[in-house]
Image: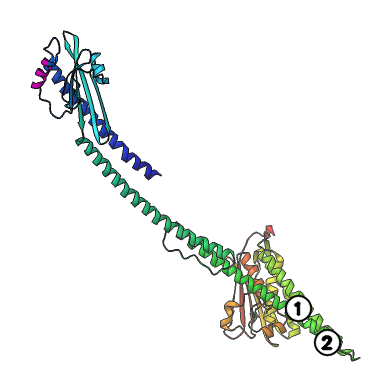
Amino acid sequence: MVIVGVLLLLNSYPLLVSEDLVFRSKATTLQASVSVMVNSLSGLDRLTEENVTAAMSVVEETGLSRILVTDGAGRVLYDTRETGANVGDYALYTEIVQALMGADAFSCTYKGAAFRSRASSPVLYQNQIIGAVYAYEYDTEQAALLADLQSNLLRLSGVVLVVVLMLSLILSKALTRKIGLLLTAIRQVREGAYSHRAEIRGRDEIAQIGHEFNSLADRLQITENTRRRFVSDASHELKTPLAAIRLLSDSILQTDSIDLETPREFVSDIGREAERLSRITEDLLRLTRLDSGILEPGTAVDVLPVLEQAMRMMSLVAQEKGVDLTYSAAEGCTVLAAKDEIHQVIYNLTDNAIKYTAAGGAVQVTLSREAGQVVLSVADNGVGIPEADLPRIFERFYRVDKARSREAGGTGLGLSIVSDTVKRRGGSVEAANRPGGGALFTVRWPQTEGEEAG
Ligand code: ADP
Protein backbone atom coordinates (compact mmCIF):
# COMPACT_ATOMS: atom_id res chain seq x y z
CA MET A 1 0.00 0.00 0.00
CA VAL A 2 2.79 2.39 0.94
CA ILE A 3 4.67 1.59 -2.25
CA VAL A 4 1.52 2.11 -4.34
CA GLY A 5 0.95 5.44 -2.60
CA VAL A 6 4.51 6.53 -3.33
CA LEU A 7 4.19 5.48 -6.95
CA LEU A 8 0.94 7.40 -7.36
CA LEU A 9 2.65 10.48 -5.96
CA LEU A 10 5.63 9.91 -8.26
CA ASN A 11 3.28 9.75 -11.22
CA SER A 12 1.31 12.86 -10.44
CA TYR A 13 3.36 15.45 -8.58
CA PRO A 14 6.23 15.98 -11.09
CA LEU A 15 3.71 16.15 -13.94
CA LEU A 16 1.61 18.75 -12.15
CA VAL A 17 4.69 20.82 -11.40
CA SER A 18 5.95 20.62 -15.00
CA GLU A 19 2.51 21.46 -16.32
CA ASP A 20 2.40 24.50 -14.10
CA LEU A 21 5.86 25.57 -15.29
CA VAL A 22 4.76 25.29 -18.92
CA PHE A 23 1.60 27.31 -18.16
CA ARG A 24 3.69 30.08 -16.64
CA SER A 25 6.17 30.22 -19.50
CA LYS A 26 3.29 30.17 -21.99
CA ALA A 27 1.64 33.06 -20.20
CA THR A 28 4.79 35.16 -20.37
CA THR A 29 5.64 34.47 -24.00
CA LEU A 30 2.10 34.68 -25.34
CA GLN A 31 1.32 37.85 -23.45
CA ALA A 32 4.59 39.35 -24.70
CA SER A 33 3.61 38.51 -28.28
CA VAL A 34 0.16 40.03 -27.77
CA SER A 35 1.63 43.22 -26.33
CA VAL A 36 3.97 43.54 -29.33
CA MET A 37 0.90 43.41 -31.58
CA VAL A 38 -1.02 45.85 -29.37
CA ASN A 39 1.95 48.23 -29.61
CA SER A 40 1.93 48.08 -33.39
CA LEU A 41 -1.76 49.08 -33.34
CA SER A 42 -1.45 51.73 -30.68
CA GLY A 43 -0.97 54.64 -33.02
CA LEU A 44 -4.38 54.19 -34.62
CA ASP A 45 -7.41 56.21 -33.46
CA ARG A 46 -9.84 53.79 -34.99
CA LEU A 47 -9.42 50.20 -36.11
CA THR A 48 -10.52 49.15 -39.57
CA GLU A 49 -9.88 46.07 -41.63
CA GLU A 50 -7.41 47.91 -43.76
CA ASN A 51 -5.30 49.69 -41.21
CA VAL A 52 -5.20 46.61 -39.00
CA THR A 53 -4.14 44.35 -41.91
CA ALA A 54 -1.51 46.90 -42.84
CA ALA A 55 -0.21 47.18 -39.30
CA MET A 56 -0.27 43.43 -38.74
CA SER A 57 1.62 42.66 -41.92
CA VAL A 58 4.71 44.26 -40.36
CA VAL A 59 4.43 42.23 -37.20
CA GLU A 60 6.26 39.02 -37.60
CA GLU A 61 4.66 36.50 -35.39
CA THR A 62 5.54 32.91 -36.05
CA GLY A 63 4.58 29.93 -34.02
CA LEU A 64 1.09 31.19 -33.26
CA SER A 65 -1.81 29.22 -34.62
CA ARG A 66 -4.15 32.13 -34.80
CA ILE A 67 -4.15 35.87 -34.37
CA LEU A 68 -7.40 37.80 -34.16
CA VAL A 69 -8.00 41.53 -33.99
CA THR A 70 -11.46 42.84 -33.17
CA ASP A 71 -12.89 46.32 -32.91
CA GLY A 72 -14.37 47.71 -29.72
CA ALA A 73 -17.57 45.74 -30.19
CA GLY A 74 -15.84 42.43 -30.73
CA ARG A 75 -16.25 42.23 -34.45
CA VAL A 76 -13.40 40.53 -36.23
CA LEU A 77 -11.20 42.83 -38.33
CA TYR A 78 -8.30 40.54 -38.87
CA ASP A 79 -7.93 36.74 -38.64
CA THR A 80 -4.91 34.64 -39.62
CA ARG A 81 -6.88 31.50 -39.93
CA GLU A 82 -7.79 30.88 -43.53
CA THR A 83 -10.52 28.37 -43.09
CA GLY A 84 -13.72 29.97 -42.09
CA ALA A 85 -12.23 33.45 -41.92
CA ASN A 86 -14.50 35.26 -39.58
CA VAL A 87 -13.87 38.78 -40.67
CA GLY A 88 -17.05 40.71 -40.03
CA ASP A 89 -18.40 38.25 -37.47
CA TYR A 90 -18.38 38.75 -33.76
CA ALA A 91 -15.79 36.71 -31.91
CA LEU A 92 -16.89 36.80 -28.35
CA TYR A 93 -14.35 34.44 -26.77
CA THR A 94 -14.03 34.77 -23.02
CA GLU A 95 -10.54 36.24 -23.32
CA ILE A 96 -11.70 38.81 -25.93
CA VAL A 97 -14.66 39.83 -23.75
CA GLN A 98 -12.29 40.32 -20.83
CA ALA A 99 -9.91 42.37 -23.00
CA LEU A 100 -12.74 44.56 -24.26
CA MET A 101 -13.59 45.22 -20.64
CA GLY A 102 -10.05 46.48 -20.16
CA ALA A 103 -8.16 43.54 -18.68
CA ASP A 104 -5.38 41.34 -20.04
CA ALA A 105 -6.62 37.78 -20.25
CA PHE A 106 -4.80 34.49 -20.45
CA SER A 107 -5.83 30.85 -20.28
CA CYS A 108 -4.08 27.63 -20.99
CA THR A 109 -5.19 24.00 -21.06
CA TYR A 110 -3.32 20.79 -21.44
CA LYS A 111 -5.44 18.19 -23.14
CA GLY A 112 -5.12 15.63 -25.89
CA ALA A 113 -1.31 15.80 -25.96
CA ALA A 114 -1.30 19.55 -26.66
CA PHE A 115 -1.05 22.83 -24.79
CA ARG A 116 -3.72 25.27 -25.95
CA SER A 117 -2.98 28.80 -24.77
CA ARG A 118 -5.00 31.88 -25.36
CA ALA A 119 -4.09 35.47 -24.55
CA SER A 120 -5.89 38.69 -25.23
CA SER A 121 -5.23 42.37 -24.51
CA PRO A 122 -7.17 45.57 -25.20
CA VAL A 123 -6.02 48.13 -27.79
CA LEU A 124 -6.33 51.65 -26.41
CA TYR A 125 -6.51 55.03 -28.00
CA GLN A 126 -6.47 57.92 -25.56
CA ASN A 127 -7.56 55.59 -22.81
CA GLN A 128 -10.49 54.40 -24.87
CA ILE A 129 -10.78 50.73 -25.72
CA ILE A 130 -10.95 50.62 -29.49
CA GLY A 131 -10.39 46.93 -29.94
CA ALA A 132 -8.66 43.74 -28.78
CA VAL A 133 -5.85 41.47 -29.96
CA TYR A 134 -6.27 37.75 -29.39
CA ALA A 135 -3.59 35.10 -29.90
CA TYR A 136 -3.99 31.37 -29.79
CA GLU A 137 -1.17 28.88 -29.62
CA TYR A 138 -1.44 25.15 -30.15
CA ASP A 139 1.75 23.51 -28.89
CA THR A 140 2.40 19.80 -29.23
CA GLU A 141 6.18 19.97 -28.75
CA GLN A 142 6.28 20.65 -25.03
CA ALA A 143 3.23 18.47 -24.63
CA ALA A 144 5.20 15.64 -26.23
CA LEU A 145 8.04 16.23 -23.76
CA LEU A 146 5.59 16.09 -20.91
CA ALA A 147 3.99 12.95 -22.29
CA ASP A 148 7.47 11.46 -22.58
CA LEU A 149 8.17 12.27 -18.96
CA GLN A 150 4.85 10.76 -18.02
CA SER A 151 5.46 7.52 -19.87
CA ASN A 152 9.00 7.31 -18.47
CA LEU A 153 7.65 7.73 -14.96
CA LEU A 154 5.02 5.10 -15.65
CA ARG A 155 7.60 2.65 -16.93
CA LEU A 156 9.84 3.31 -13.93
CA SER A 157 6.90 2.81 -11.59
CA GLY A 158 6.07 -0.43 -13.33
CA VAL A 159 9.60 -1.72 -12.83
CA VAL A 160 9.62 -0.61 -9.18
CA LEU A 161 6.26 -2.23 -8.60
CA VAL A 162 7.33 -5.53 -10.14
CA VAL A 163 10.60 -5.57 -8.18
CA VAL A 164 8.84 -4.69 -4.93
CA LEU A 165 6.15 -7.28 -5.53
CA MET A 166 8.69 -9.95 -6.35
CA LEU A 167 10.85 -9.10 -3.35
CA SER A 168 7.92 -9.10 -0.95
CA LEU A 169 6.66 -12.32 -2.47
CA ILE A 170 10.05 -13.99 -2.03
CA LEU A 171 10.44 -12.63 1.51
CA SER A 172 6.95 -13.58 2.61
CA LYS A 173 7.34 -17.00 0.99
CA ALA A 174 10.51 -17.61 2.99
CA LEU A 175 8.84 -16.33 6.13
CA THR A 176 5.64 -18.30 5.73
CA ARG A 177 7.61 -21.40 4.81
CA LYS A 178 9.53 -21.20 8.08
CA ILE A 179 6.43 -20.45 10.12
CA GLY A 180 4.69 -23.34 8.35
CA LEU A 181 7.52 -25.70 9.28
CA LEU A 182 7.33 -24.52 12.87
CA LEU A 183 3.57 -24.93 12.98
CA THR A 184 3.78 -28.44 11.55
CA ALA A 185 6.38 -29.37 14.14
CA ILE A 186 4.27 -27.93 16.98
CA ARG A 187 1.21 -29.85 15.78
CA GLN A 188 3.13 -33.08 15.35
CA VAL A 189 4.62 -32.87 18.83
CA ARG A 190 1.24 -31.91 20.27
CA GLU A 191 -0.24 -35.04 18.70
CA GLY A 192 2.41 -37.10 20.45
CA ALA A 193 5.11 -37.47 17.78
CA TYR A 194 7.78 -36.39 20.27
CA SER A 195 10.64 -37.23 17.92
CA HIS A 196 9.51 -34.69 15.28
CA ARG A 197 11.77 -31.62 15.00
CA ALA A 198 11.43 -28.31 13.16
CA GLU A 199 14.14 -28.19 10.45
CA ILE A 200 14.64 -24.42 10.23
CA ARG A 201 17.96 -23.17 8.94
CA GLY A 202 19.32 -19.70 9.45
CA ARG A 203 19.89 -17.43 12.40
CA ASP A 204 16.88 -15.13 12.32
CA GLU A 205 14.29 -14.93 15.07
CA ILE A 206 12.10 -17.66 13.59
CA ALA A 207 15.06 -20.02 13.35
CA GLN A 208 15.81 -19.21 16.99
CA ILE A 209 12.24 -19.99 17.99
CA GLY A 210 12.65 -23.24 16.03
CA HIS A 211 15.78 -24.15 17.98
CA GLU A 212 14.09 -23.32 21.27
CA PHE A 213 11.12 -25.42 20.27
CA ASN A 214 13.39 -28.32 19.37
CA SER A 215 15.12 -28.28 22.73
CA LEU A 216 11.72 -28.08 24.39
CA ALA A 217 10.67 -31.14 22.37
CA ASP A 218 13.91 -32.89 23.44
CA ARG A 219 12.98 -32.33 27.06
CA LEU A 220 9.44 -33.49 26.43
CA GLN A 221 10.69 -36.61 24.72
CA ILE A 222 13.00 -37.45 27.61
CA THR A 223 10.26 -36.82 30.17
CA GLU A 224 7.79 -38.84 28.16
CA ASN A 225 10.20 -41.74 27.73
CA THR A 226 11.00 -41.71 31.45
CA ARG A 227 7.33 -41.62 32.30
CA ARG A 228 6.52 -44.51 29.95
CA ARG A 229 9.39 -46.59 31.27
CA PHE A 230 8.40 -45.81 34.83
CA VAL A 231 4.80 -46.81 34.27
CA SER A 232 5.75 -50.00 32.46
CA ASP A 233 8.39 -50.87 35.08
CA ALA A 234 5.99 -50.14 37.91
CA SER A 235 3.23 -52.28 36.41
CA HIS A 236 5.71 -55.05 35.80
CA GLU A 237 6.92 -54.87 39.38
CA LEU A 238 3.36 -54.99 40.68
CA LYS A 239 2.40 -57.77 38.28
CA THR A 240 5.03 -60.21 39.51
CA PRO A 241 3.85 -60.51 43.14
CA LEU A 242 0.21 -60.38 42.03
CA ALA A 243 0.80 -63.29 39.64
CA ALA A 244 2.50 -65.20 42.42
CA ILE A 245 -0.42 -64.56 44.78
CA ARG A 246 -2.87 -65.78 42.15
CA LEU A 247 -0.87 -68.86 41.44
CA LEU A 248 -0.56 -69.68 45.13
CA SER A 249 -4.25 -69.13 45.86
CA ASP A 250 -5.24 -71.24 42.82
CA SER A 251 -2.98 -73.99 44.06
CA ILE A 252 -4.63 -73.91 47.47
CA LEU A 253 -8.07 -74.11 45.89
CA GLN A 254 -7.07 -77.02 43.74
CA THR A 255 -5.40 -78.98 46.48
CA ASP A 256 -7.70 -81.74 47.71
CA SER A 257 -5.28 -83.19 50.20
CA ILE A 258 -6.16 -83.01 53.84
CA ASP A 259 -2.54 -82.25 54.53
CA LEU A 260 -2.56 -78.96 56.44
CA GLU A 261 1.10 -78.10 55.95
CA THR A 262 1.05 -77.27 52.21
CA PRO A 263 -1.72 -74.64 52.31
CA ARG A 264 -0.04 -73.09 55.35
CA GLU A 265 3.19 -72.75 53.38
CA PHE A 266 1.34 -71.25 50.43
CA VAL A 267 -0.46 -68.77 52.63
CA SER A 268 2.78 -67.64 54.18
CA ASP A 269 4.16 -67.19 50.65
CA ILE A 270 1.11 -65.14 49.81
CA GLY A 271 1.79 -63.02 52.88
CA ARG A 272 5.37 -62.45 51.71
CA GLU A 273 4.25 -61.39 48.27
CA ALA A 274 1.66 -59.04 49.77
CA GLU A 275 4.39 -57.54 51.91
CA ARG A 276 6.45 -56.98 48.76
CA LEU A 277 3.50 -55.32 47.10
CA SER A 278 3.04 -52.97 49.99
CA ARG A 279 6.78 -52.18 50.02
CA ILE A 280 6.68 -51.34 46.31
CA THR A 281 3.57 -49.17 46.65
CA GLU A 282 5.08 -47.42 49.67
CA ASP A 283 8.26 -46.67 47.73
CA LEU A 284 6.25 -45.53 44.70
CA LEU A 285 4.20 -43.21 46.88
CA ARG A 286 7.37 -41.84 48.42
CA LEU A 287 8.80 -41.17 44.95
CA THR A 288 5.58 -39.58 43.74
CA ARG A 289 5.66 -37.30 46.73
CA LEU A 290 9.27 -36.39 45.89
CA ASP A 291 8.26 -35.79 42.27
CA SER A 292 5.34 -33.57 43.18
CA GLY A 293 7.87 -30.86 43.92
CA ILE A 294 6.24 -29.76 47.17
CA LEU A 295 9.19 -29.18 49.43
CA GLU A 296 8.47 -28.48 53.06
CA PRO A 297 10.92 -25.97 54.43
CA GLY A 298 13.65 -27.87 56.23
CA THR A 299 14.75 -27.39 59.78
CA ALA A 300 18.29 -27.67 61.09
CA VAL A 301 18.58 -31.37 61.92
CA ASP A 302 21.47 -32.77 63.94
CA VAL A 303 22.31 -35.94 62.02
CA LEU A 304 24.04 -37.75 64.90
CA PRO A 305 20.97 -38.77 66.95
CA VAL A 306 19.17 -39.81 63.77
CA LEU A 307 22.16 -41.96 62.80
CA GLU A 308 22.35 -43.51 66.26
CA GLN A 309 18.70 -44.43 66.16
CA ALA A 310 18.99 -45.92 62.66
CA MET A 311 22.07 -47.91 63.68
CA ARG A 312 20.23 -49.38 66.69
CA MET A 313 17.53 -50.59 64.36
CA MET A 314 19.84 -51.85 61.60
CA SER A 315 22.17 -53.67 63.97
CA LEU A 316 19.38 -56.19 64.54
CA VAL A 317 19.09 -56.80 60.78
CA ALA A 318 22.87 -57.05 60.48
CA GLN A 319 23.08 -59.45 63.38
CA GLU A 320 20.47 -61.67 61.85
CA LYS A 321 22.45 -61.81 58.60
CA GLY A 322 25.80 -62.24 60.34
CA VAL A 323 27.19 -58.95 59.08
CA ASP A 324 29.29 -56.74 61.32
CA LEU A 325 27.80 -53.22 61.39
CA THR A 326 29.93 -50.45 62.91
CA TYR A 327 29.74 -46.69 62.77
CA SER A 328 31.73 -43.64 63.70
CA ALA A 329 30.34 -40.13 63.86
CA ALA A 330 31.51 -36.56 64.41
CA GLU A 331 29.48 -34.11 66.43
CA GLY A 332 27.82 -30.96 65.12
CA CYS A 333 26.76 -32.32 61.75
CA THR A 334 23.71 -30.16 61.07
CA VAL A 335 21.72 -30.29 57.86
CA LEU A 336 18.75 -28.23 56.69
CA ALA A 337 16.21 -30.99 56.02
CA ALA A 338 13.56 -33.12 57.73
CA LYS A 339 14.45 -35.84 60.25
CA ASP A 340 12.52 -38.49 58.32
CA GLU A 341 14.43 -37.73 55.14
CA ILE A 342 17.80 -38.23 56.84
CA HIS A 343 16.55 -41.40 58.44
CA GLN A 344 15.31 -42.71 55.08
CA VAL A 345 18.67 -42.06 53.42
CA ILE A 346 20.67 -43.77 56.18
CA TYR A 347 18.22 -46.64 56.31
CA ASN A 348 18.18 -47.31 52.55
CA LEU A 349 21.96 -47.19 52.16
CA THR A 350 22.68 -49.32 55.23
CA ASP A 351 19.94 -51.77 54.29
CA ASN A 352 21.48 -52.17 50.82
CA ALA A 353 24.97 -52.59 52.26
CA ILE A 354 23.76 -55.41 54.52
CA LYS A 355 21.62 -56.91 51.73
CA TYR A 356 24.49 -57.14 49.25
CA THR A 357 27.11 -58.34 51.72
CA ALA A 358 27.48 -61.99 52.52
CA ALA A 359 27.49 -63.32 56.08
CA GLY A 360 30.81 -62.57 57.79
CA GLY A 361 31.18 -59.29 55.89
CA ALA A 362 31.41 -55.85 57.43
CA VAL A 363 29.54 -52.59 56.93
CA GLN A 364 31.07 -49.33 58.11
CA VAL A 365 29.01 -46.12 58.35
CA THR A 366 30.86 -42.84 58.85
CA LEU A 367 29.49 -39.37 59.52
CA SER A 368 31.89 -36.43 59.22
CA ARG A 369 32.24 -32.78 58.27
CA GLU A 370 34.31 -31.63 55.35
CA ALA A 371 34.66 -28.07 54.05
CA GLY A 372 31.16 -26.87 54.86
CA GLN A 373 29.58 -30.20 54.02
CA VAL A 374 28.14 -33.02 56.07
CA VAL A 375 29.39 -36.30 54.61
CA LEU A 376 27.79 -39.66 55.21
CA SER A 377 29.57 -42.69 53.81
CA VAL A 378 28.39 -46.28 53.85
CA ALA A 379 31.05 -48.84 52.95
CA ASP A 380 30.75 -52.59 52.72
CA ASN A 381 32.90 -55.44 51.56
CA GLY A 382 30.15 -57.25 49.70
CA VAL A 383 29.60 -58.07 46.03
CA GLY A 384 30.26 -54.54 44.80
CA ILE A 385 28.72 -53.06 41.65
CA PRO A 386 29.96 -53.77 38.11
CA GLU A 387 31.55 -50.59 36.71
CA ALA A 388 29.15 -50.59 33.74
CA ASP A 389 26.14 -50.44 36.08
CA LEU A 390 27.48 -47.69 38.35
CA PRO A 391 26.03 -44.76 36.36
CA ARG A 392 22.57 -46.33 36.28
CA ILE A 393 21.95 -47.67 39.76
CA PHE A 394 20.15 -44.49 40.85
CA GLU A 395 17.54 -44.98 38.12
CA ARG A 396 14.11 -46.19 39.10
CA PHE A 397 13.74 -49.99 39.17
CA TYR A 398 17.31 -50.42 38.04
CA ARG A 399 18.96 -53.45 39.56
CA VAL A 400 22.24 -55.11 38.74
CA ASP A 401 20.94 -58.55 39.57
CA LYS A 402 17.15 -58.67 39.50
CA ALA A 403 16.86 -62.12 41.06
CA ARG A 404 19.21 -61.34 43.91
CA SER A 405 17.53 -58.01 44.61
CA ARG A 406 14.07 -59.56 44.63
CA GLU A 407 15.24 -62.38 46.81
CA ALA A 408 16.63 -59.85 49.24
CA GLY A 409 13.30 -58.04 49.24
CA GLY A 410 14.47 -55.07 47.16
CA THR A 411 12.14 -52.95 45.06
CA GLY A 412 14.75 -51.29 42.87
CA LEU A 413 13.57 -47.91 44.12
CA GLY A 414 15.68 -47.46 47.24
CA LEU A 415 18.58 -45.62 45.61
CA SER A 416 16.24 -43.42 43.51
CA ILE A 417 14.57 -42.33 46.72
CA VAL A 418 17.96 -41.61 48.29
CA SER A 419 19.13 -39.61 45.29
CA ASP A 420 15.90 -37.59 44.94
CA THR A 421 15.71 -36.89 48.67
CA VAL A 422 19.30 -35.69 48.91
CA LYS A 423 19.20 -33.60 45.75
CA ARG A 424 16.09 -31.77 46.90
CA ARG A 425 18.09 -30.36 49.79
CA GLY A 426 20.98 -29.28 47.57
CA GLY A 427 23.08 -32.35 48.32
CA SER A 428 24.58 -35.12 46.20
CA VAL A 429 25.14 -38.85 46.32
CA GLU A 430 27.67 -40.99 44.51
CA ALA A 431 28.47 -44.66 44.29
CA ALA A 432 31.87 -46.28 43.83
CA ASN A 433 33.60 -49.58 44.29
CA ARG A 434 36.18 -49.99 47.00
CA PRO A 435 39.66 -51.10 45.90
CA GLY A 436 39.49 -54.16 48.12
CA GLY A 437 35.98 -55.13 46.94
CA GLY A 438 32.57 -53.95 48.04
CA ALA A 439 30.66 -50.75 47.44
CA LEU A 440 31.01 -47.28 48.86
CA PHE A 441 28.16 -44.76 48.87
CA THR A 442 28.91 -41.15 49.77
CA VAL A 443 26.21 -38.58 50.52
CA ARG A 444 27.02 -34.88 50.88
CA TRP A 445 24.67 -32.25 52.29
CA PRO A 446 25.45 -28.59 52.68
CA GLN A 447 26.21 -28.02 56.32
CA THR A 448 24.00 -25.54 58.12
CA GLU A 449 24.76 -23.65 61.35
CA GLY A 450 21.73 -22.66 63.29
CA GLU A 451 20.82 -25.29 65.79
CA GLU A 452 18.55 -22.71 67.35
CA ALA A 453 16.29 -23.10 64.33
CA GLY A 454 15.93 -26.82 64.94
P1 ADP B 1 17.07 -52.63 45.48
O1 ADP B 1 15.75 -52.53 46.14
O2 ADP B 1 17.12 -53.61 44.39
O3 ADP B 1 18.19 -52.76 46.45
P2 ADP B 1 18.15 -50.01 45.07
O4 ADP B 1 17.65 -48.87 44.29
O5 ADP B 1 18.32 -49.82 46.52
O6 ADP B 1 17.22 -51.23 44.76
O7 ADP B 1 19.51 -50.45 44.46
C1 ADP B 1 19.65 -50.61 43.08
C2 ADP B 1 20.65 -51.66 42.72
O8 ADP B 1 21.95 -51.23 43.06
C3 ADP B 1 20.49 -52.92 43.52
O9 ADP B 1 19.56 -53.79 42.88
C4 ADP B 1 21.87 -53.51 43.52
O10 ADP B 1 22.10 -54.23 42.34
C5 ADP B 1 22.74 -52.31 43.51
N1 ADP B 1 23.24 -51.97 44.86
C6 ADP B 1 22.76 -51.08 45.73
N2 ADP B 1 23.49 -51.01 46.85
C7 ADP B 1 24.47 -51.91 46.71
C8 ADP B 1 25.57 -52.36 47.54
N3 ADP B 1 25.79 -51.82 48.74
N4 ADP B 1 26.39 -53.32 47.04
C9 ADP B 1 26.17 -53.83 45.83
N5 ADP B 1 25.17 -53.49 44.99
C10 ADP B 1 24.32 -52.55 45.44
Q: State which region is magenta.
A: 50-59
Above or below for 449 versus 415: above
From the viewer's perspective, is residue 73 above or below residue 217? above
Q: Looking at the rendered structure, which numbered label has been put on residue 251?
A: 2
Q: Residues within 10 Å of mark 2 (few under 14, many from 20)?
A: some
Q: Residue at x 59, y 86 (%)?
A: 436
Q: Is residue 57 magenta?
A: yes
Residue 267 horizontal side relative to residue 117, left or right: right
Disc on the earlier residue, 1 or 2: 2
As helix, strand or loop, the secondary structure at mark 1 comes to helix
Res 438 quadrant in image: bottom right
Mark 2 CB in 8 Å range of ligand 1?
no
On the image, the x and y values in percent for residue 111 come to 28, 33
- What residue is at 67 percent from the left and 81 percent from the top? 363
On the image, numbered disc 1 is attached to which residue? 276
The secondary structure that most of the magenta stretch takes on is helix
